[in-house]
Amino acid sequence: MRKIISSAVVALLALVLIQNPASAMGSGNKYSDAQTGVSYQILQPGSTGDLTLRMFNMQSCGAGKEQWLAAIYGETRSIQFLETDASVKCSNPGLGVKVATATINGNKASIVAFCDPANAKQWKNCKTSDIHNYGGYAMWKVPPTKLLHGTEVEVLVSGLTYADLLKLARAMKPVGRISK
């Protein structure tokens, strides 16, 4: 009987590992795992509210350049966390109006709302409250550490407010410094 149970456990474990190989490797924390493969500082969200992870991967930045991180939480209401080496531009958040500057963990950030450039009145009068209606983002650079290059961070939101955007961005911490 013991041999049958032992064989069943081994077979079940093999099946789990074959179906989900990522769970067999790494720390179990996608952000920590991403940090091991790049020379810039990876930041991890401290909170995503009630939004669940929909996509996480490392994107190509072209030949000879490090990959950049892209994580998306939620669907209709969503947050995107995009991170890359600060010296390399790998993503483009899109056309918008700079509506504010803010301090994110000691770093100056540009705040942009995605107002419609085809609507002259909307474009001219675009403000932080329009982030809730049209989406927007915060973008800033984190300086290098002794061991890691600096990071450019973009936090894009859809269906969330300017206050939500700031709260999410300010909750981001370098991997290894997130308290549970």
Image (spheres, rainbow, N blue to C red):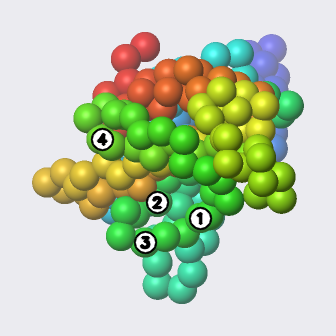
Residue matched to label 3 = 88
Q: Is residue 99 above or below residue 45?
A: below
Amino acid type, label 1: Ser
Q: Which residue is mark 2?
A: 84
Which of pointers 3 and 4 lies earlier in the amino acid sequence?
3
Mark nearer the viewer, 4 or 2:
4
Residue 153 x %, y %: 46, 49
Disc 3/disc 2 C-alpha distance (Å): 7 Å
Please name the residue that numbered disc 4 is placed on. 107
Residue flagged by tag 4: what amino acid is it?
Asn
Assign a secondary structure to mark 1: loop
**What mark, if any, has residue 91 been given in the picture?**
1
- Pointer 3: residues within 10 angstroms few (<14), some, or many (20+)? few
Q: Earlier in the sequence, mark 4 or mark 1?
A: 1
The reply to whether discs 3 and 2 touch (Cβ–Cβ < 8 Å) is yes
Of discs 4 and 1, which sits in the foreground?
4
Mark 2 or mark 1, which is nearer the start of the sequence?
A: 2
Between 73 and 120, the residue placed more toward the observer is 120
Residue at point 14% right, 54% down?
146
Disc 4 to disc 1, C-alpha distance: 20 Å
Can you say which quadrant of the picture contains the C terminus?
Answer: top left
Q: Residue, x 66% and y 53% (percent of image)?
A: 96
Q: Characterize the local packing of mark 4: few (<14), some (14-19) or many (20 or more) Cα atoms within 10 angstroms.
A: some
- Tag 3 secondary structure: loop
In the picture, measured across the screen, residue 137 lies left or right of residue 41, that is right
What amino acid type should be assigned to the residue bearing mark 2? Thr
